[in-house]
Amino acid sequence: MSQGGAAAGNGVSPGNVPVCYYGQAGRVPAALERRVRAAELFLRCAACGLAVLAAALLGADRQTRVFFSVEKEARYTDMQSLAFLVIANGMAACYSLLQGARCLVSILTGGVLISRPMAWAIFSCDQAMAYFTISAVAVAMEAAVIGKYGNTQFQWMKTCHLYKRFCGQAGGAVACAVAASLNLVGISLVSAFNLFRLYGSGKGRK
């Protein structure tokens, strides 16, 4: 076996430059690989933390007002859009935690994702979670706008002037959910990179 072939088998180029090989003659510098892994781990941890914060803010959000000797408590369960947002962020937090643990183990053990079915599964799940959270955020933002300004055409009254503290905390939760969904979009881009770099062109290496 030639020196160049042995170096390629060990993941090092003949010029003693560390590289990682993927798919059919796909070559990725080791420095880029480390940056991609670090970025993925950071995005998944950030998405998990922001999703947990959004769900916690909404879950603990409540305010009681008295109207004509009748107490009325505002909670996130009073609006289906906010309840949907809590569920979506809870699912996103659990998913990001599991995937973040997988990334951490991969970094510590030096493992490389070279399985195309596994890469497709991660890519599909990341895409689905990103779309799911974005849809939940869009619905919650629409409900927030109606609660803030009302809708005269449908005779929907604005309510945020009556429950200012509730609406303020709910707005913070929606902002955290928006940030979490943006992190999930970034994660889906990283998983797309990890998948499609397995489909290089040229003669394959073993």
Image: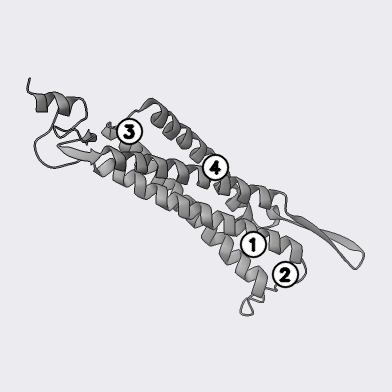
Work out how far the residue at label 1 is from the one at label 4, CA to CA, in angstroms: 19 Å
Q: Residues within 10 Å of mark 4 (few under 14, many from 20)?
A: many
Amino acid tagged 4: Ala
Q: Are marks 3 and 4 in contact (CB under 8 Å)?
A: no
Q: Quadrant of the N terminus?
A: top left
Which secondary structure lies at badge 4?
Answer: helix
Q: Is residue 122 above or below residue 174?
A: above
> Does residue 187 appear to the left or right of 62 in the view shown?
left
Q: Is residue 185 above or below residue 125?
A: below
Read off the residue under disc 1.
Answer: 171
From the top left corner, tell me how far across and down residue 96 is, in percent.
49, 40
Read off the residue under disc 2.
Answer: 159
Coloring scheme used:
one colour
Work out how far the residue at label 1 is from the one at label 3, CA to CA, in angstroms: 37 Å
Disc nearer the start of the sequence (1/2): 2
Q: Are marks 1 and 3 in contact (CB under 8 Å)?
A: no
Q: Nearer the viewer, mark 4 or mark 2?
A: 4
> Does residue 186 appear to the left or right of 196 in the view shown?
right
Read off the residue under disc 4.
Answer: 93
Amino acid tagged 1: Gly
Tell me which residue sits at (51%, 42%) in the image: 45
Number of numbered tags placed on the structure image: 4
Read off the residue under disc 3.
Answer: 118
Which secondary structure lies at badge 1?
Answer: helix
Q: Quadrant of the C terminus?
A: top left
Disc nearer the start of the sequence (1/4): 4
> Does residue 19 appear to the left or right of 87 in the view shown?
left
